[in-house]
Amino acid sequence: MQTFTRFSPPSSYPNMTPGSNSLIWFRKGLRIHDNPALEYAAKTSTHVYPLFVIDPHYMKPDPTAFSPGSKLAGLNRIRFLLESLLDLDSNLKKLGSRLLVLHGEPGEVLIRCLKEWDIKRLCFEYDTDPYYQSLDAKVKEWVAKFEKPNTDPSAFLKPATTMLSPYLKFGCLSSRYFYQCIKEIEKEFKNHTSPPVSLLGQLYWRDFFYTVGFGTPNFDCMRGNKICRQIPWNNDDELLAAWRDARTGFPWIDAIMVQLRKWGWIHHLARHSVACFLTRGDLFIHWEKGRDVFERLLVDSDWAINNGNWLWLSCSSFFYQYHRIYSPISFGKKYDPSGAYIRHFLPVLKDMPKEYIYEPWTAPLSIQKKANCIIGKDYPKPVISHETASKECKGKMAAAYELNKKQNGKVSDEDLQNLRTQVGDRSQVTSSRRLKQKLI
């Protein structure tokens, strides 16, 4: 059984040494190196108190969620955070300090610390997440008034990317330090790759989404987001659950979703595949629904980047070639013809011949029996026909784009409903025919 490490707030916080005291509030910058907030806190300060606040908003277990974890994060990301805190504490020990960890609503905890510890300077890094922006405003206001202070998505044994995204997300690795390291390496190799496909390019994309996310009101929504195409997405909780719980009947898609739930990480092209499948490629379900699943399960989930990628992959913003679809069959097969990735994450299909591993429903019954996997019993039948669904999705996207162009982006709820009626809500047409899928 998985349990949470609980940190209870003391009735009275530790007595601190009086003097010129600074408090460094660690949030994402969980590191000693290249930490401007920490450096600033140390300037002209007699004492610097390193603090991390366990936020119930982020950490409180949610028994009603579809996977173990809190309301906002799955166990994988929570575990990574706790391990990062242990690493930070270990590094602080080497400097003769320790990480102070308190539990509670961060605004209340910080205000209490500022009062009781006679803090003259509060230092922390800026955050693009709206929740923490509002928290910053609540804390910067109290302080102001206080008079004293190209890789393989199927590679899993040895992933084909750096897998540094969680370390960048939590600030364990400084993006500036990483940038300088890359620049030093590039000096040694004249034929290095260039942005946007290089590692530097990935850092640029990160900052791009941070910038656009910060400067765009309602960046995490379709409605009220001036850079987002208004599209009449289907509302189908049954299909959403099948996608989320790896029951679509498409092994490539389901294997990716199993890896996501187990590891808390998937290759960026795997993210592209399942995001396209959920939205404009096959199921035509709202990108916000998929965004929420990624937000919960990804160890490296970052508000600006997660929303930016879903806007991009659903062809709602940034990228508009909606006719280019990731096939849930041929795309994975291009990288992994034998289906090793599928066999690993979907062991129910481990004995399926490679000729059928991406389309097991096409295997003769005799082959299914020999593989100990009867489609529709041991593994789900496909929830849709990809050939049919992808054509329908392209038609809906074309109609939505035409409406947005005609209305100059000012599409009302009534306009969307009329368009939904015009193109036909596919979920209503097929729900009565769709087979209930057994949870595998």
Image (tube, helix red, strand yellow):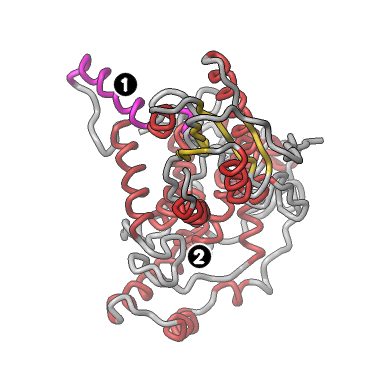
Nearest to the observer: residue 340 or residue 188: 188
Nearest to the observer: residue 40 or residue 46: 46
Q: Which amino acid type corresponds to the residue marked 2 in the rendered image? A: Phe
Residue at 34% over, 37% down: 202
Residue at 55% over, 24% down: 88
Q: Which amino acid type corresponds to the residue marked 1 in the rendered image? A: Cys
Quadrant (top left, top right, bottom left, bottom right) of the N terminus:
top right
- Residue 439 appears anywhere in the view: yes
Q: Place residue 50 in its image quadrant.
A: top right
Tell me whether circle 1 and circle 2 mark residues in contact (CB < 8 Å).
no
Instruction: Tell me the residue that label 1 is attached to.
Output: 181
In the rendered structure, which segment of residues is drawn in magenta?
171-190
How far across and how far down the image is residue 277, in percent?
50, 55
Nearest to the observer: residue 114 or residue 268: 114
How far across and how far down the image is residue 435, in percent?
71, 64
* In magenta segment, residue 235: no
Residue at 61% over, 72% down: 430
Q: Place residue 101 in its image quadrant.
A: top right
How far across and how far down the image is residue 113, in percent?
60, 41
Residue at 76% over, 55% down: 64
Nearest to the observer: residue 434 or residue 159: 159
Instruction: Tell me the residue that label 2 is attached to.
Output: 284
